[in-house]
Image (cartoon, rainbow, N blue to C red):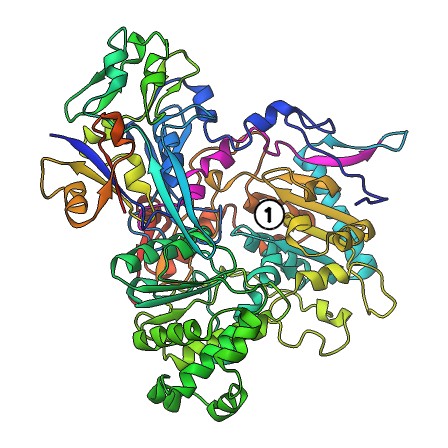
Amino acid sequence: MKTNRRQFIKISTLGTGAIALGLSSLNFNGINAAYAAEKNEAVSDEDMTPYPTFCEVCFWKCAAWTYVDKKGEIRKIIGNKEDPHCNGRLCPRGTGGIGMYHDEDRLKTPLIRETKENGTQYYREASWEEALDLIASKMSKIKKEHGPECVALFSHGTGGKLMGHLVKAFGSPNISAPSFAQCRGPREVAFTATYGEDVQSPERTDIRDTKCLVLIGSHIGENMHNGQIQEMSDAIDNGATIITVDPRFSTAASHSKYWLPIKPATDLALLLAWTHVLIEEELYDKEYIKKYAFGFDELKEHVKDKTPEWAFGITTIEPEIIRRTAREMAYASPAVIVHPGRHVTWYGDDTQRSRAIAILNALLGSWGRRGGFYVPEKVHLPKYPSPPYPKPSRTWKDAYPPGKYNLVHEVLSTGICDATIPNPDMDYQLRAWIVYGTNLLASLPDQNKTLEAIDNLEFLVVIDTMPMDITAYADVVLPECTYLERYDFVRTSPHREPFLALRMPAAKPKYDSKPNWWIAKQLGSRLGLDEYFKCDSIEEVLDWQLKHVGSSLEEMKRIGVKKFDR
Amino acid sequence: MRYAMAIDTKKCVGCGDCVVACQTENNVPHGYCRDWIVENVSGSYPNVEIELRSERCNHCDNAPCVRCCPTGASHIVEGGIVMVTHNECIGCGACIESCPYDARYSHPEGYVDKCTFCKHRLDKGQNPACVEVCPTKCLHFGDLDDPNSDVSKALKNRRWKVLAPEAGTKPQLYFLT
């Protein structure tokens, strides 16, 4: 792995450009760095001030309280009992989230790539002023020479929305999350094709009330999708049947009634055989199918010869086990979930496999039923008034022949990456990337291609809290403060009932790090986009939004989480 | 009063949340822990079993660590909780050697440290931090003398075992099987 133009620059704890020191690895997660600051033991909750937040370690976004001691040090994070995402219990990552704040390896100051006389490249510490000026001048140059849509944003996490606002105002529609195609994208496309709606996040699975939970390559318990683990534990208490399909004996498998150690990459055959058994033995929900479905006869015809015996030769699962598990599902119907999974990008047949899962759930009548898939609710916050975004003349799809990515309803990261490498068959080429909160070298497939794309970039900005592979290739690195030190947009994710959750800073940003709101506004102002950032602070925006739904920033600061009527 | 904990091995997923919550609650120095996860795999393919256990000090009724402590730093308080008075401990490590559960560690400041069942929280009527955080609710805590406590109810309805019963320590961690 090598690049010619951009050298890989390690960012060390003590400064810039040097080799990462061994010492820093001893404190890599920094959970107990508070210890170094103060050598006492447990601090009682009454001696601390709790600030509301929601977790940013994963997409589940559990609401929590950040406890700060009298010296202003963040001591622990405890789940918010009112929040249905976590019910007061964070997962180990959320509990350990203070490690993000205390980590000694954090990005501490803006960095600009420089080249020495002998050709070696290094990072120079820079002021925010200088770093932002440089980014704005490069973006303006690319806008002038190639068009604004030649700047792309890769983002992940809550703060990405703010950067997205900036990039849309700048005039580029090329805003992408690698997590879509690499994670739940095929699932959402498949469920939309089957039901007209996607599964969403958190998943609308009613595991709490289910009588039968089928996991196919989904390792609830190892994946720590908090609410689902809690509900699976409740389901075990309620005597629900768990069927786990996994070549590996996973934690979930160890808690299951049935473990089907399937031959890898043959899941689709098992799903078709289950479908065959449900139809052949007339175990499917006939009324439900008659009322809501079309295309049943074609399905019946398609799976006619997909017998358990046929599947046995492919999957190595005994025909008798295939029949028995299919019957277990049917007995539990409609309180049964064939879990759609989350990270579903495996073998290339992913969308079709997810469709088979969606169809199987339809046969079991579980979509929209108690113990199956609930109908999610959410609070719709109005968008803060801002001029309409300029209409882009081209989107990323225009770089490809018409019809190439027909089903994709989000911007494909690999599509952006490929369109950055010069290709005579493509209409246009992307010139600059802003990478926010995602380590592209680990989150895009084909690392060599990503490196080739990076080599062809005119400019690469990385905004993050920690150094990682992608920061080593940046032209400018901006240190964002962690989720514990900033406001973000209010969490509106769907659940059984509509909820809002607030994130507010529990401490001042450490080092010379800055909140994403400030970064976006500063860049906006340098790019002549002041009208898109009229407020002086994000608090104004949040308060305005919250007041429109009968709450306020003041109230949310006090309660953290608010439930609304359905 | 007799504090005890029951750990449901049929529900634990071994996530380690109990360990992290204990570390942040009790300010355990980096690289050390007062509780930990044991993953016991038995059988052979395809008949395999995994037993997951969240383990910590067993707060034994017949605690060898207390008997062997030369200064009396290790002692038992009300409710049967085995405690260490840090400023009376000389860090000799006899208790560490005597514990069949390997539940104690040498704190970098020179004394021996271990699980306290979060006594500072119990005193205020709260559960230990590990119990309070567990996403699967597989940790049951309470007073064995109270038949309505969470731990009493869990033990009444399930089969359970203790670790190293042959050591004769009368441990107070019960593993629901």
Classed neighbour count for the residue bearing mark 1: other residues with Cα under 10 Å, few (<14), some (14–19), many (≥20): many
Q: Nearer the viewer, residue B119 or B71?
A: B71
User: How many numbered marks, from 0 up?
Assistant: 1
Q: Residue furthest right?
A: A118
Rendering coords of residue A501 (x, y %): 38, 52
Location of residue A185 (image quadrant): bottom right
- Give the residue number, with chain letter if any, for mark 1: A437
Q: Is residue A65 left or right of residue A451?
A: left
Q: Is residue A332 magenta?
A: no
- Residue A153 visible from this viewpoint: yes
Q: Which residues are magenta?
A: A87-115
**Whole-percent x, y for residue B1 in the image:** 11, 30
Q: Nearer the viewer, residue B4 or A541?
A: B4
- Three-letter amino acid code at the position of disc 1: Gly
Q: Please check the rendered image and state whether residue A108 is part of the magenta-colored stretch, yes or no.
A: yes
Residue for point 72% across, 41% down:
A476
